[in-house]
Image (cartoon, rainbow, N blue to C red):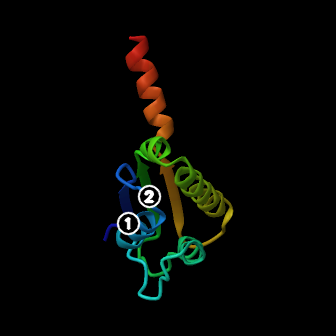
Amino acid sequence: MNNTLVVDINLGSLGTSSSFLKIMSEKLYFPDYFGFNYDALDECMQDLSWLPEEKIIINFRFIERVKRKNESLYKIIYGCLVMYQEYWQKTQYKKKVILNFWIKLYKLMMKVIFEW
């Protein structure tokens, strides 16, 4: 039995908070009680107990596209993701949750491409 769940979440086409909340709910299989608001997102993202895997890797891709389209939405999403990343880094829980923000890799790749 594989005890690791890898989830890729493409943020590139997001334009609204509701689309962000919906994709998070779908990709992470949020429980039926998820209320599609940021308080409910905080609660679910700091729990994840309904997922049986002990290690969860969540890759957030194309967050820089959100920034170009809707900077205020980007700030909300980025702030949430940083908060969840910090929470899981210091939480002593039976699960290990890793959040990856691909913007750092994207910037590095662009730098290498344009300097080459």
Q: Is residue 91 above or below residue 102?
A: below
Q: Residue at x 38, y 11 (%)?
A: 116
Residue sitting nearer the eye, 57 or 64: 64
Graded by Cα atoms within 10 Å as few (under 14), some (14 to 19) or many (20 or more), the crowding at tag 2 reads: some
Give the spatial CA distance, label 1 vs label 2: 13 Å
For disc 2, the marked residue is 58
Q: Position of residue 62 (x, y in %)?
A: 40, 45
Q: Position of residue 15 (x, y in %)?
A: 41, 56
Q: Position of residue 106 (x, y in %)?
A: 43, 34
Graded by Cα atoms within 10 Å as few (under 14), some (14 to 19) or many (20 or more), the crowding at tag 1 reads: some
Q: Position of residue 71 (x, y in %)?
A: 54, 47
Total marks drawn?
2
For disc 1, the marked residue is 23
Q: Residue at x 44, y 58 (%)?
A: 57
Residue sitting nearer the eye, 77 or 43: 77
Q: Is residue 24 above or below residue 81?
A: below
Q: Quadrant of the N terminus?
A: bottom left
Identify the secondary structure beneath mark 2: strand
Asked which quadrant contains residue 112, the reply is top left
Q: Residue at x 42, y 53 (%)?
A: 59
Identify the secondary structure beneath mark 1: helix
Residue 76: assigned label: none
